[in-house]
Image (spheres, helix red, strand yellow):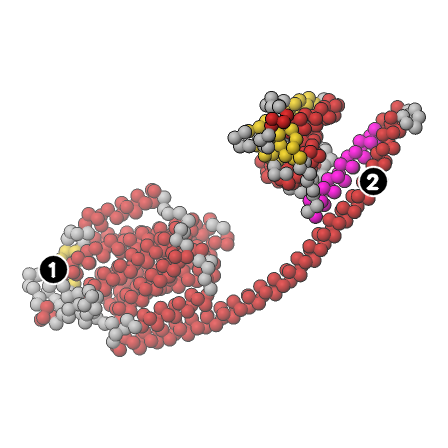
Amino acid sequence: MQSNIVIDPTYCGWDQATLLIFSENVFGNFIYYSHLFPAIAILILAAFVFLQNWKLRANRALLFMAVVFSIWSFFDLILWATEKPEFTMFFWSILIYFDFLIYVGALYFIYAFVEDRYPSVRAELVIFALFVPLLIFAHTSVNLTGYDYTNCYREALEGPLWQYYLYNVEILVLAWILIYGLYKAHKVAPSKRTSVRLATFGITAFLFLFSLGNILGSFEVDWELGQYGLFGMPVFAGFLTYLIVRYNALNVKILATQALITTLVILNVSILFIRKVENIQIIAVATVLLTLGIGFVLARSVKREVEQKQLAQQLATELAGVNVRLERLDKMKSEFVSIASHQLRSPLTSVRGYISMIIEGSYGEVNPKVKEVLTHVSDASRHMALSIEDYLNVSRIEAGNMKYEIADYDLKKLANEVVVELVPVAEKKGIKLEFKPATEEGVAVKLDIGKSRQIVQNLIDNALKYTKDTGTITVVVRKDKEKKKAYVDVIDQGIGISPEGLKTLFQKFERAKNANEINVTGTGLGLYIARTMANGMGGDITVASEGEGKGSTFTFVMPLNGIEAKWT
Ligand code: ADP
């Protein structure tokens, strides 16, 4: 009930507040501790986290929550300390916004923590709709019915907005956060599960204690008891610190020791806010207990960190040893391949030479049946020689011995020569191989002629190998003067390449699945060697295919020389 009797401040013995919050009107100095310690703790933590990585949404939401909570605490302190009814009315009526905003901050935080996103637009609309009644009624008697002049309590009388609207909304948002967090904990990757659960519990514990304190204050009018609700915030800060230290949450790298020492400092600094002896004992005992607990954890974590460091050092030494051994082995392997290949190459060359002489009739007439068999032997030995050449090239690449003899040459001419050479091979397979230059001019490029020929030959060879029956292989030479590049495209209508296959083709020994299906023997080294050589000459090889069965296009790209005139 509102009364018209105006209480005289001097009659009530009210003190005049300095700096808005310091006066004798508060029921005890404990109130400074309960308001300032949680606010300072979360502000320091949130600011630290924010400065470490301000781009992370969760860190921004945390800072927002910390700031809103601190403003709330400050305004609440004003309510306790002030002797001015108009201050009480003003700050009490706007306190309702901040109460709500703490919840909004918590909701944004948990979304950002779990999914690195803020609530959806639909969810935001719901939040806004819940906020609208506050906007409309905060400054009416629905919020505060008036000031209680009948006693010396310096109190405003709460209307239904707090007790029947805000607290219900808070319970709703609390349930929202809890259900969302626990539901998502099932959905996220197993490694994130515990941290999502801990963050959810931490934040709901804080909100629950905070609201409980306020509800107790509002309904029981026991505002003293309500103070304890504020300690929900340091509880949340504790959860967060644990998450940061243990799970690297919020992208903050911090050692347990740093976190614990900071906590000790905050604890001790906040004792400075207690100005009277009456509460010091409780707080001192609490601080001693906390210090003991923290000291214990501190000692353990230092021990663990030292042990981890020692382990890491030990591992590093072992790894260095293993590395040296591996390097030596790798070198030995390359040398072995090189020696073996060289020793295989020369006898094979003479075997091939003799066979072709026999086939050609240098040693007399050969019966057609034997000739046919010898042709197979010759094909097989050619294949073997090519494989040996591949191995030799790989060992040259790995040993860094690949040498390039760069000269000016016409890429169009080079491609044409290779095509002419391979047309008979294509015809034998029933495949049409055609050369279609897209430019009338020459295409001057600085390149190693032998290696470039090998590259183009390899691409056409592949196109022949990976075309099942009949089809056309088109070799296009073109140039792009603006980009200063020359291109040789080898376009086939063969078995094509799947998107997964495209990713690995150029790696050593990689062959696509469908390559084996058409039963072609291959080493999976050709493209690796070709690309390495192209790179070595300042060029590249690219590939495009729309998928299996849809043909492929391999392109040999080289920088244009700009001195075409020579060949036009
Ligand atoms: P190899 O042909 O000896 O297997 P390459 O390095 O030349 O080795 O080619 C690697 C793989 O790339 C082949 O096994 C094949 O899967 C795929 N490939 C290369 N050229 C073509 C092509 N023209 N069409 C379809 N797949 C190809």
Answer whether labels 2 and 1 touch (C-beta < 8 Å): no
Confirm or reject: label 1 Cβ below 8 Å from ligand 1. Answer: no
Residue lying furthest right: 364
Determine the image quadrant of residue 528: top right
Q: Position of residue 303 (x, y in %)?
A: 52, 70
Q: Is residue 497 left or right of residue 158?
A: right
Quick one: label 1, few (<14), some, or many (20+) residues within 10 Å?
few
Where is ligand 1, by quadrant? top right
Compare marks 2 and 1 and give the one earlier in the sequence. 1
Q: Is residue 423 above or below residue 310?
A: above
Magenta stretch, residue numbers = 374-399
* Label 2: element kind: helix
Give the residue pinned by disc 1. Answer: 1
Q: In this view, does 342 lie to the left or right of 565?
A: right
- Residue at 47 percent across and 61 percent down: it is 246
> Which amino acid type is marked by label 2?
Ser
Along the line of sight, the residue nearer the viewer: 403 or 561:
561
Q: Position of residue 172 (x, y in %)?
A: 31, 51
- Whether residue 165 appears in this view of the structure is yes
- Residue at 40 percent across and 51 percent down: it is 55
- Whether residue 490 appears in this view of the structure is no
